[in-house]
Amino acid sequence: MSPGDETWLREPQDTEWDPSEAERIADSLTRFNTDDVVALALGWTFATPWRQVFGKFPQFSLASGAGSGKTSTALLMANLGGNMIEETASAQQTKFVVTRQMASTTTLPITLDEFKPNEMQDWTLRRLQDLLRLNYDASLAGRGRADQSVVNYQLTAPVILLGEGTRDQTAIVDRIVRPKRSRSRLEESQDYQEAYGHLRASNLGMFALAYQRWALSQTADLESIQIPELGGSLRAAHNHRVVKFGWLMLEKFCREVVGVPLPEIDIDRALVASMENLGYLETRDGKIRPKSTRSDVDILMEAIHDAIVNGLLHPGVHWVRRPQKGDVIIRIGSVLGKLQSTGVRLMDQADYRRIIREGDCPYAEWSDKKQADFTRQDPTHGTMRTKGPLVIDPVKLAEETDIPVALWEGELAMVSEAERLESSQ
């Protein structure tokens, strides 16, 4: 850990262990915000020493309105994680600055404020989302030099996102943990304010460093962590298992090192609230149930289905079914161009390519090799051999969505092939 002169990292200064102060910190830890926020915030923060061990590590998202304690909670999390900053950094800095922040540490939490997808320009949002995807897996981000060489940065920092936006792509939601929003203004709660004020006045660096040293002797057995059966993706389950692991480690540290029990909070209830907040769960008939979620590729396929049924997309021109192979080849570039007139909000072709290649879609493949014979723009010139490059398994698509296999056989289209050829002449 070498923070150097970066403004987004500050090492603890006074780290001499004080048992009585550690007890006072432990007593205030669970009282600075609502239970749902506290449980997830502390669980995530105290899981950060194992960031490299877990490989995949979620970002912590604080998305709520003014007065809900986003900034104070984020700074407290950073300090408890050993980063003694006093101000948050902006998510809307240049790509290189954000890249350096994400590559500057492996365990100390960093903050990215002003993450407002609904207000950010598309290219700024897309650039940041690309970095967040890489950060989740601790992957490399390259930066070119004038001599045409490339410098790679490994994006390992645990990241706290602060903002008020809600326009999340499925690929981003799958990589974050987000506590349930508080509807009350925290500055109006005297109990929250007193606990927060006490923590900010305490030697959190001492507490953080002692925990990190203790963590070096602990085994990280993530698979043994039991979480509620919440539905959602495997990635979401991993994220919430990370949080519960951190909470259990904090409880153990307080018992073994501080010598006092951590005040009880129902961590499983907080996990359920987070999953509901992220859209994986819904309340029906007074019960919380798994919610059927649609991925970005699902939304694309539904838009393609509607366009085929309404005669906007045509077999042979926009897609070709290969009966012997059992798949469908889609000319995605041409299809996205056609779908622009429908008003459906879609992503760029590059975004779909990345999502599909990451393996998030069981019925789709992105191939640079598979080809089919497509009808030319002028039908009298016959066909042309070309790549899709989106390859769909119609049977698996039907299993995952409500889109029938018969769609690709032309049986659902409202406009006949004869009418299409006539209108194209």
Image (cartoon, rainbow, N blue to C red):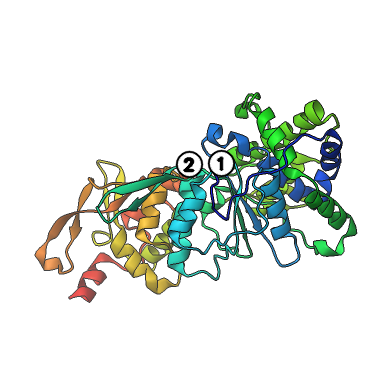
Residue of label 1:
57
Residue of label 2:
138
Q: Residues within 10 Å of mark 1 (few under 14, many from 20)?
A: many
In the image, taking residue 111 as reference, residue 402 lies left or right, namely left
Identified by mark 2, the residue type is Ala
Q: Residues within 10 Å of mark 2 (few under 14, many from 20)?
A: many
Classify residue 237 by image quadrant: top right
From where the camera sits, is residue 402 visible? no
Judge by depth and name the residue closer to the eye, 67 or 399.
67
Image point (46%, 62%), residue name: 94
Judge by depth and name the residue closer to the eye, 53 or 8.
8
- Whether residues under marks 2 and 1 lie with C-beta atoms below 8 angstroms apart, the answer is yes
> Mark 2 or mark 1: which comes first in sequence?
1
Classify residue 301 by image quadrant: bottom left
Image point (27%, 56%), residue name: 146
Identified by mark 1, the residue type is Phe
Image spot of residue 82 (x, y percent): 66, 43
Q: Secondary structure at mark 1?
A: loop
The Cα atoms of the two marked residues, 2 and 1, are separated by: 8 Å
Image spot of residue 23 (x, y percent): 85, 37
In which quadrant of the rendered image does the N terminus lie?
Answer: top right
Image spot of residue 79 (x, y percent): 69, 47
Judge by depth and name the residue closer to the eye, 161 or 90.
90
Classify residue 47 by image quadrant: top right
Judge by depth and name the residue closer to the eye, 167 or 68.
68
